[in-house]
Image (spheres, grey):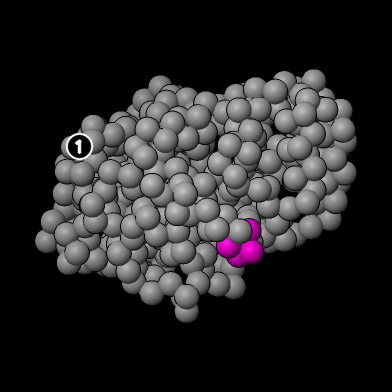
Amino acid sequence: MDKVTIIIPVYNVEKYLREAIDSAINQTYKNLEIILIDDGSTDNSGKICDEYAKLDDRIKVIHKINGGLSDARNAGLDNATGKYIMFLDSDDFFELDAAEKMYNEIEEKDADYVIGNYINVTDEGEKWERPVFDLEKFKPFKLSIYDYKNSFFIMNSGVWNKIFKKEFIDKLNLRFVLGLPAEDAIFTTYCFMKAEKVYYTPHIVLNYRQRAEGSISNSCSRKYFDGINKAYRIIYENFRDNGHLGYYRYFYSKSMNYIMYKFIDSVLLTDEERKEILQEMLWFYKLTIELEVPPCQKAEEKIIGRVINGDYVIALKYCEILREARTYMTMQEKESMSKPGPDKYKEISLLDEKYSK
């Protein structure tokens, strides 16, 4: 049985860290290398990592100066010795048979990487009613970047519900881009463009924690939007330069909706900062015209239309109204509103042939 490396970046997560590490060391698959990267934590996270290293010789701890999530993951990749790589964020936790299921699948299929199902959990670890990928709709299958009806919906941006062949990552000389949000999306979309064999298994492998203190309104500062603007440009240019604008149109619809509602919900921005962000991301919102991808909702259409026309005062007024309305919604309702629906993807599909050439 080949070694699987689990990379866990750690930064000030003492509240959740033990549950994450326990879920790794108690895997039914035992041939593991667990790399804990303490990214300059100022709480007890670093001590907890060292405590576990004394209890389990499969654990390797790296203490480093804070460099951010991408830098921590890169440190893990640089030190990984397993044939396969899995990632676990330190506030999430694996199902106990995750590594076994993922290892068996990637070995059987000789895949570049495999994608597993996952389920959202509350801050306290209580599971939501159903997993993210519908168990009835999505059965095991091989993904294709030319398949927009199934593969697109399974190829989520996160690295934490996947197992990668280390040889595949090394061949691409691939690392996480430093200092930007959406680092997962840059990494996984590039992998998808370059992979020959990618498979999906509906087995639930990860519990993805929806943290209250990590909510949209508390986390999206001016700096965040500066970073997301750069990250989205990298992703767009990668798709464009690799000739995959057909797939990107679907990705764009989803990410446009996602970032617009992050912008709307944020309470950390002044009106002047909001205007500056919209001006700097004008290239991004203009893609709705260039790629013929209509906004997902009428309200969003009105906002983007005003932005493209330079009418920022009215655009921001619309945002303010929506922000107030969304304060009365549950987290699940907000998440549903922040995703394109089936009708929107059907509308996008009308031009598949044009953009897949």
Crowding near the residue tagged with mark 1, few <14, some 14–19, many ≥20 C-alpha atoms within 10 Å: few
What residue appears at the point 40 percent right and 22 percent down from the top-left corner? 65
Measured as percent of width and height from the top left, residue 357 is found at 38, 47
What residue appears at the point 70 percent right and 44 percent down from the top-left corner? 261
Q: Is residue 102 magenta?
A: no
Q: Residue furthest bottom?
A: 136
Q: Secondary structure at mark 1?
A: helix
What residue appears at the point 80 percent right and 20 percent down from the top-left corner? 272
Measured as percent of width and height from the top left, residue 27 is found at 30, 63
Q: Is residue 353 visible?
A: yes
The chief SS type of the magenta part is helix
- Based on the displayed image, in which of its 4 quarters is residue 39 positioned? top left
- Seen from the viewer's position, the closer of residues 128 and 322 is 322
Measured as percent of width and height from the top left, residue 46 is found at 41, 35
Which span is picked out in magenta? Answer: 342-346
Compared to residue 144, the image places residue 34 above or below, namely above
Q: Relative to 112, is 217 on the left or the right?
A: right
- Seen from the viewer's position, the closer of residues 167 and 248 is 248
Q: Is residue 68 visible?
A: no
Name the amino acid, label 1. Asp
Measured as percent of width and height from the top left, residue 320 is found at 85, 39
In which quadrant is the N terminus drawn? Answer: bottom left
Q: Relative to 268, is 116 on the left or the right?
A: left
- Based on the displayed image, in which of its 4 quarters is residue 229 positioned? top right
Compared to residue 123, the image places residue 66 above or below, namely above
Compared to residue 343, the image places residue 16 above or below, namely above
Q: Is residue 344 magenta?
A: yes
- Seen from the viewer's position, the closer of residues 344 and 85 is 344
What residue does disc 1 label? 170
What residue appears at the point 13 percent right and 56 percent down from the top-left corner? 2
Q: Relative to 141, is 17 on the left or the right?
A: right
